[in-house]
Image (cartoon, helix red, strand yellow):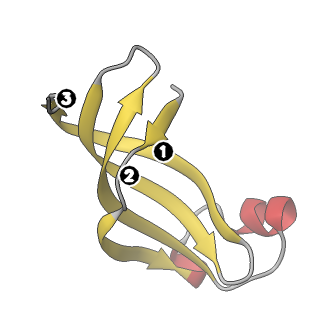
Amino acid sequence: MPFEILTEISHIETIAHGRGIRDLRRLRRTYGEGHWRKRKGFATVRLADGTMWFVELHWYEAHGIGKNEIKIKRFLHEQHAQQ
């Protein structure tokens, strides 16, 4: 599901790191060696249909490599455009 992140990601937490990441081997093969972390945070996004939602996002991140595989984990509530 394509989406665009509209706000800065807030309340960022590390939920797994190093060997605690199930996909560590695949991440290293795909993106390279690094100190990988699985992170989560919250932001407002716009979906392909134009609706805006406040969501929980999950992604993998490594220093020098950046954020990868950002996905929406939970839809929290719909946002309405301010006029």
Please state, as top left, top right, bottom left or bottom right, where the C terminus lies in the image: top left
Q: Is residue 17 left or right of residue 9?
A: right
* Neighbour tally class for label 2: few under 14, some 14-19, many 20 plus, Cα within 10 Å: many
Q: At label 3, which amino acid type do we have?
A: Ala
Compared to 3, does 8 lie above or below?
Answer: below
Q: Indicate which label's residue lies in the foreground, 3 or 1.
A: 3
Marks 3/1: CA–CA distance: 23 Å
The secondary element bearing badge 3 is classed as loop
Q: At label 1, which amino acid type do we have?
A: Lys
Marks 1/2: CA–CA distance: 6 Å
Callout 3–callout 1 Cβ contact below 8 Å: no
Callout 1–callout 2 Cβ contact below 8 Å: yes
Which residue lies under the disc numbered 1? 71
* Neighbour tally class for label 3: few under 14, some 14-19, many 20 plus, Cα within 10 Å: few
Q: At label 2, which amino acid type do we have?
A: Leu
Residue 24 percent coordinates (x, y)? 67, 68
Which residue lies under the disc numbered 2? 57
Q: Is residue 35 left or right of residue 57?
A: right
Callout 2–callout 3 Cβ contact below 8 Å: no
**Which mark is first along the chain, 1 or 3?**
1
The secondary element bearing badge 1 is classed as strand
Nearest the viewer among 25 and 54 is 54
* Neighbour tally class for label 1: few under 14, some 14-19, many 20 plus, Cα within 10 Å: some
Marks 2/3: CA–CA distance: 21 Å
As drawn, the label of residue 81 is 3
Q: Residue at x 40, y 41 (%)?
A: 72
Nearest the viewer among 14 and 43 is 43
Q: Residue at x 85, y 64 (%)?
A: 29
Residue 58 percent coordinates (x, y)? 43, 55
